Image (cartoon, rainbow, N blue to C red):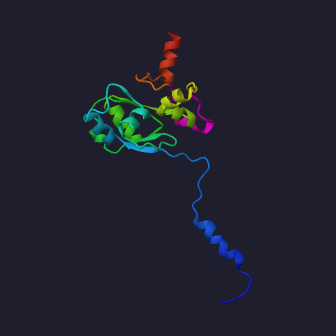
Amino acid sequence: MKFGFGGADSIAPSFAEKRIQKPFSLTFQPVGLGKIAYLINAGKIDSHELITMKTLKDTGAIGKQIEDGVRLMGRGAEKIKWPIHLEVSRVTVRAKEAVEAAGGSVRKVYYNKLGLRALLKPEWFEKKGRLLPRAARPPPKQKDKVDSIGRLPAPTKPIPFFTEEGAVASSSA
């Protein structure tokens, strides 16, 4: 063993072993279609109403700690046999195809941290004597990942999707 200066080398591995979090990374709560189908069959969720992140939280489909939103996963996609309308933060391709094959729709909505709090806990704002905040626009890097801006207070009916072709056809008529 060679003696001498070596202190700088011994501290280097401790920094490399720590997992470095990306400062702008987003954390979504996953929820599978199988769990949503189970809750609809149990009568906890009404399939004729719009299913929002608040509905999923209130029925226990996801945990109470929602950091940046909800990601809809395709697990249990074969259990969806009826049309459902969902508003979530992110959705996988398999989940979107399964819901649309059953005649439903999935809308990817954007809520910032304050908007998500207003969606999930509107009573907090009432208790403090504050107004609900206005919905925020998504940052430029996330604009292509969302279909619309979230609505406050929580909506109960789905809003129709407008495609570019449908908007052009209606404006020229």
Q: Nearer the viewer, residue 74 or 29?
A: 29
Q: Which residues are magenta?
A: 135-152
Question: In which quadrant will I find the N terminus?
Answer: bottom right
Q: Quadrant of residue 45?
A: top left
On the picture, is 82 further left or further right than 170? left
- Considering depth in this image, is 149 or 10 the residue closer to the camera? 10
Q: How many marks?
A: 0
Q: Measured along the vertical axis of the image, is residue 15 above or below residue 115? A: below
> 96 or 30: nearer the eye?
30
| Percent x, y of residue 140 | 62, 36
Residue 139 rendering spot, x and y as whole percentages: 61, 36
Based on the picture, tell me whether residue 11 belongs to the magenta stretch: no
x 51%, y 18%: residue: 167
In the shown orientation, is residue 88 left or right of residue 45?
A: right
Residue 149 seen: no
Asked if residue 89 can be seen in this view, the reply is yes
- Percent across and percent down for residue 90 are 47, 39
